[in-house]
Image (cartoon, helix red, strand yellow):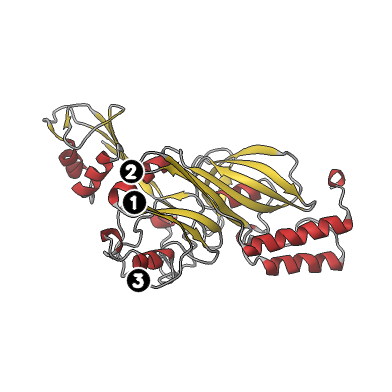
């Protein structure tokens, strides 16, 4: 028996419809798959990599060997090499980056803000507005197209792979840090770390409302909305969706909006956006989840104009991937990267700071 869980945006599974206006991005979205295999009672002894190549459809031996090299294949709970001889009733689990999707990728010379790069990884500070990988409605100008140009001499980026090197992604209109693997070994290592939830990720978000608690945790299954397939939805009763946990801490209160830091324990499509909206605090100017309307504040025309001016300053959801940390695929040492808030985010915070000081808001009365 083989069980397979694909940990990618649901769009890849059920709504890749021609002509559909689908947002294929998702903050924290992991791009790997997990297989569980129980060896049959009558199975003769066979090399682990050969056995899995036979049992797993459309999975090459090279991918399996790369997973084994990264200690991503467990037999009876322990990492094993490709040469391990499988035995009857062995319990095998394997985590691998999602298989390649062939697409005609034409390398594009798009400038990238490279925070760090070595032989194994490249860390990008993505600007808002850039889509991470090709999808419906986004066949050019993506991060993958840019990487295919900048890394065109590497095998992984010269084969027309629409998911080259990716192990996670962030929304088109979310700015911030994203790590990309430059070879198969690094790819497998990072995929395993995302699967184990050991990746350190911190986001900064501006949300509507004055959050009551200084810090807290939001837990609620996230899945595709039954009413709107372009939105995600929290299934509070756990009947559908995937387990999702977001930890938050208040950084600054501006009365009618709050600046928070969010730490992802899991990585689901639009996780921070949908969790915050579910709690009654949509992200500021998040059109998809209702944050592009005036949700808190006064009825004065001057205030309405002030908010409209803020929307113009940051014409996107107010979300930035500020920190990213993980164990380096080669050295094994922990590395962490930080990113300053982009100019549009800084500008809107300065505007709220000035407004709060000028009107003398009493936070206890809001």
The answer to whether residue 54 of the structure is visible from this angle is yes
Distance from disc 3 to disc 1, alpha carbons, whole Å, reads: 20 Å
Q: Which residue is mark 3?
A: 107
| Residue 233, percent from left and from top | 57, 50
Could you classify mark 2 by the number of other residues whose Cα lies within 10 Å: few (under 14), some (14-19), or many (20 or more)?
A: few
Residue 148: which quarter of the image?
Answer: bottom left
Residue, disc 2:
330
Q: Determine crowd level at label 1: few under 14, some 14-19, many 20+ residues with C-alpha closer than 10 A.
A: some
Checking the image for residue 120, the label placed there is 1
Q: Dot 1: what SS?
A: loop
Mark 1 vs mark 2, CA separation in Å: 8 Å
Residue 215 is left or right of residue 269, and the answer is right
Q: Residue at x 33, y 55 (%)?
A: 182
Tell me the tag on residue 105.
none
**Label 2 near label 1: C-beta < 8 Å?**
yes
Q: Residue furthest left?
A: 44
């Amino acid at each position: 028996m083989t069980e397979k869980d694909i940990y990618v945006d649901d769009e890849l599974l059920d709504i890749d419809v021609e002509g559909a206006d689908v947002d294929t991005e998702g903050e924290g979205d992991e791009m790997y798959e997990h297989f569980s295999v129980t060896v049959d009672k009558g199975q003769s002894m066979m090399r682990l990599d050969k056995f899995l190549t036979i049992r797993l459809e459309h999975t090459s031996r090279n991918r399996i060997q790369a997973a084994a090299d990264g200690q991503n294949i467990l037999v009876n709970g322990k990492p094993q090499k490709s040469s391990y001889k499988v035995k009857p009733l062995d319990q095998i689990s394997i985590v691998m980056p999602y298989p390649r999707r062939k697409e005609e990728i034409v390398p594009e010379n798009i400038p990238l803000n490279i925070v760090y790069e070595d032989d194994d990884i490249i860390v990008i500070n993505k600007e808002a507005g850039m889509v991470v990988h090709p999808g419906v409605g986004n066949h050019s100008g993506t991060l993958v197209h840019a990487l295919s140009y900048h890394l065109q001499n590497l095998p992984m980026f010269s084969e027309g792979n629409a998911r080259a090197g990716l192990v996670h992604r962030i929304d088109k209109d979310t700015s911030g840090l994203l790590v990309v693997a430059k070879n198969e070994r690094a790819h497998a290592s990072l995929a395993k770390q995302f699967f184990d939830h050991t990746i350190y990720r911190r986001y900064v978000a501006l949300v509507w409302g004055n959050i009551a608690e200084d810090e807290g945790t939001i837990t609620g299954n996230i899945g595709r909305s039954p009413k709107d397939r372009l939105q995600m939805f929290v299934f509070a009763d756990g009947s559908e969706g995937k387990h999702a946990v977001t930890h938050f801490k208040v950084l600054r209160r501006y009365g009618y909006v709050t600046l928070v830091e969010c730490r992802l324990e899991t990585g689901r499509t639009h996780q921070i956006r949908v969790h915050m909206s579910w709690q009654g605090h949509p992200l500021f100017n998040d059109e998809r989840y209702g944050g592009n309307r005036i949700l808190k504040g006064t009825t004065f025309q001057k205030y309405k104009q002030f908010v409209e001016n803020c929307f113009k300053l940051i014409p996107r959801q107010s979300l930035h991937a500020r920190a990213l940390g993980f164990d380096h695929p080669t050295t094994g040492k922990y590395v962490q990267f930080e990113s300053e808030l982009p100019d549009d985010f800084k500008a809107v915070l300065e505007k709220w700071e000035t407004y709060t000081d000028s009107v003398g808001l009493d936070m206890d009365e809001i």
